Amino acid sequence: MGAADPLKDIEHYAQVMKAPRIRESAARLAEQARSDGWSHEDYLAAVLSREVTARESSGTQNRIRLAGFPTPKTL
């Protein structure tokens, strides 16, 4: 992996880490970061935030499904 195409490196690392939302959001957020003047830290935090939010949501859905509730209900 080299500095020739950092987005390809990010996609590869995300695939190895089994983090598909990073692959999906990295390029879009990179473009936004460039246009809005984000720091490297701001960009990284935004990408990781997307992944964490998606994992938390997915984990909650899996726990509800595994609990064997008949149908999700809301108030």
Image (spheres, rainbow, N blue to C red):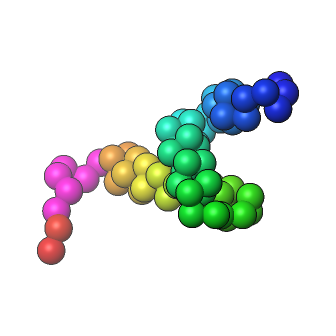
Would residue 58 be found to the left or right of residue 45 on screen?
Answer: left
Residue 55 visible in this rendered orientation of the protein? no
- What residue is rendered at 57% in x and 63% in y? 36
Q: Residue at x 58, y 43 (%)?
A: 26
Residue furthest bottom as drawn = 75
Quadrant of image for the N terminus:
top right
Query: Of 24 and 27, which appears nearest the observer?
Result: 27
> Residue 50 at what x, y percent from top left?
52, 55
Q: Is residue 48 above or below residue 39?
A: above
Nearer to us in this view, 59 or 69? 59
Residue 39 in percent (x, y) is at 72, 63
* Magenta highlight: main SS: loop
Task: Report the front residue among 52 and 60.
Answer: 52
Residue 69 lies in magenta, yes or no? yes
Q: Is residue 48 magenta?
A: no
Q: Residue at x 65, y 57 (%)?
A: 43
**Quarter of the figure with the C terminus:** bottom left
Question: Residue 48 in the image: x percent, y percent?
Answer: 62, 55
Q: For the point 56% across and 57% down, which residue is it? A: 35
**Residue 53 position (above or below residue 70):** below
Let me know if residue 22 appears in the view. yes
Q: Which residues are magenta?
A: 68-73
Number of numbered callouts drawn: 0
